[in-house]
């Protein structure tokens, strides 16, 4: 997600269309919450992958998954 977002922003700045293409759009509260939840899930999964890679015990891996999902 971060790579896509950064690439999109860089492309708009390099091409010079950043201000021309940005029309005023109304964003709903649900869209904002969904985007926040999506970013949170991505970073949580990153933490889980790190924890699983460092753990030798299954119980630690399961606990890491449960905490990150929670």
Image (tube, rainbow, N blue to C red):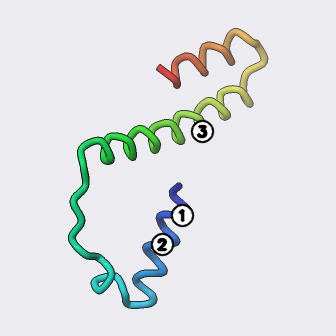
Give the label on residue 48, or none: none
Q: Residue at x 53, y 55 (%)?
A: 1
Q: For marks 3 and 2, give the one nearer the viewer.
A: 2
Residue that label 2 marks: 8
Instruction: Compute the Cα span from label 1 to label 3.
Output: 17 Å
> Does 19 appear above or below 3?
below
Q: Where is residue 6 in the image (x, y as percent from the top left)?
A: 48, 67
> Does 5 appear above or below 34?
below
Q: How crowded is mark 3: few (under 14 residues within 10 Å), some or many (20 or more)?
A: few
Does 29 sit left or right of 64 as displayed? Answer: left
- Residue 12: name its quadrant: bottom left
Instruction: Compute the Cα span from label 1 to label 2.
Output: 6 Å
Q: Residue at x 39, y 46 (%)?
A: 35
Residue that label 1 marks: 4
Q: Earlier in the sequence, mark 1 or mark 3?
A: 1
Q: Where is residue 30 in the image (x, y as percent from the top left)?
A: 29, 41
Q: Nearer the viewer, residue 60 or 44?
A: 44
Q: Position of residue 61 (x, y in %)?
A: 68, 18
Q: Nearer the viewer, residue 47 or 11?
A: 11
Does 25 sit left or right of 65 as displayed? Answer: left
Does 5 sit left or right of 17 as displayed? Answer: right
Q: Nearer the viewer, residue 29 or 56?
A: 29
Q: Which of marks 3 and 2 is nearer the N terminus?
A: 2
Q: For marks 1 and 3, give the one nearer the viewer.
A: 1
Residue that label 3 marks: 46
Q: Residues within 10 Å of mark 2 (few under 14, many from 20)?
A: few
Q: Considering the numbered disc 2 on the image, is that residue within a helix, a strand or a loop? A: helix
Q: Which residue is drawn at 48% across and 72% down?
A: 8
């Amino acid at each position: 997600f971060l790579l896509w977002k950064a690439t999109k922003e860089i492309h708009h700045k390099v091409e010079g269309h950043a201000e021309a293409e940005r029309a005023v759009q109304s964003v709903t509260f649900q869209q904002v919450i969904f985007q926040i939840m999506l970013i949170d899930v991505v970073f949580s999964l990153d933490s889980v992958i790190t924890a699983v890679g460092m753990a030798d015990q299954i119980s630690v891996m399961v606990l890491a998954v449960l905490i990150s999902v929670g």
